[in-house]
Amino acid sequence: MIATKNDLTEIPRKTPNPKWTVTTFVLLCFLFSSRFWYLIPQLPAVEKDQTPRILYTTGFMWCPAMAAILTRLWYQRNLKGFGLGLGKVRWLLLGMLIPVFVGLLMFGSAWMSGVAPLNASGFAVVFSRSFIPRFIFGIVSGGICAFGEELGWRGFLVPELARCMNFTGVSLLSGAIWAVWHFPLIIFGTYHGVGPLWYSLAAFTPLVMGLGFVQAWLRLASGSIWGAVLLHGFWNFLIQGIFPLFTQTTPAGERMLGEFGWFAPVISVVLALGFWRFRNRLPKLTEA
């Protein structure tokens, strides 16, 4: 009997090898990102018009999502498996609270120790009516950008790696890819601290890889990407935007605070060890 076209479309597709899907995703992600690795460093350090930087940054942060979508369509012929369901509220709350906790601990330590004292004028700015549009824009744009990244890193990469690795391997490899993806902007652009370049790389790499454990745990425990999206979005908004407004700039503070200071990677590694300790509570996703 000759199979018709309709018969052939009903034949289930074989589950793709995760090594192939991950390799394809990473190659596409880095290929798409290469244009922004070139464009973003070309922007002047001080800009009157922030529109190009906002557009380029948004496009850059959506490269993982586009790579994930194309990879899923190529191998799976559908867009299932990204974890778009909300999941349990406790994981969403945990994703939001972790950046708040880290920010208060990091900047609070600097305020109390005098390394970087409180900036009283910052409170006047943040709690003024004129700050409301900036606050709304920061939340919305940060959420959109964070969703673009997390759809790729945690929506696609983490569950694909979990089909052939244990939690430790998934976290280390996904975190390493996530960190390396930022390196061109750190090395050639303005996305780095004020000290030597090696210091920025030495601080940023363990920070991102430590958060990779936390993000992977949230994704696998909840079956949803939204806890990771909230963590990522709140982190960018609070650590990069809000807490620095409350803080006076000092040389010691610049070496300690933010994504390129020494404090964030330390607390990130501590968090990673804490979540790694509970790795056995995760559902088993690895295939034989």
Image (cartoon, rainbow, N blue to C red):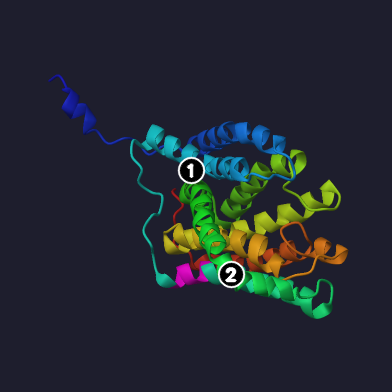
Residue ranking furthest to the left: 1
Picture disc at residue 65: 1
Using a 10 Å C-alpha cutoff, classify the residue at mark 2 as few (fewer than 14 neighbours), some (14 to 19) or many (20 or more).
some
Q: Which corner quadrant holds the N terminus?
A: top left
Q: Which residue is mark 2?
A: 98
Q: Residue at x 81, y 61 (%)?
A: 254
Q: Element under label 2?
A: helix
Q: Amino acid at mark 2?
A: Ile
Q: Nearer the viewer, residue 18 or 111?
A: 111
Q: Amino acid at mark 1?
A: Ala
How far, Cα to Cα, is label 1 from label 2? Answer: 24 Å
Q: Residue at x 56, y 60 (%)?
A: 134
Image-based side of 136 in relation to 111, left or right: left
Specify which label sits upstream in the sequence, 1 or 2. Answer: 1
Q: Position of residue 31 (x, y in %)?
A: 58, 31
- In reply to whether residue 100 is colored magenta, the answer given is no
Q: Are marks 1 and 2 in contact (CB under 8 Å)?
A: no
Q: Element under label 1?
A: helix
Q: Residue at x 40, y 32 (%)?
A: 74
Res. 182 image quadrant: top right
Picture disc at residue 83: none
Q: Position of residue 261 (x, y in %)?
A: 78, 60
Identify whether 189 is placed above or below 89: above
Q: How many marks?
A: 2
Identify whether 117 is placed above or below 231: below
Q: Residue at x 58, y 41 (%)?
A: 60
Q: Nearer the viewer, residue 134 or 239?
A: 134
Residue range of the region highlighted in magenta in the rendering: 90-95
- In reply to whether residue 91 is colored magenta, the answer given is yes
Task: Answer yes or no: is residue 55 visible.
Answer: yes
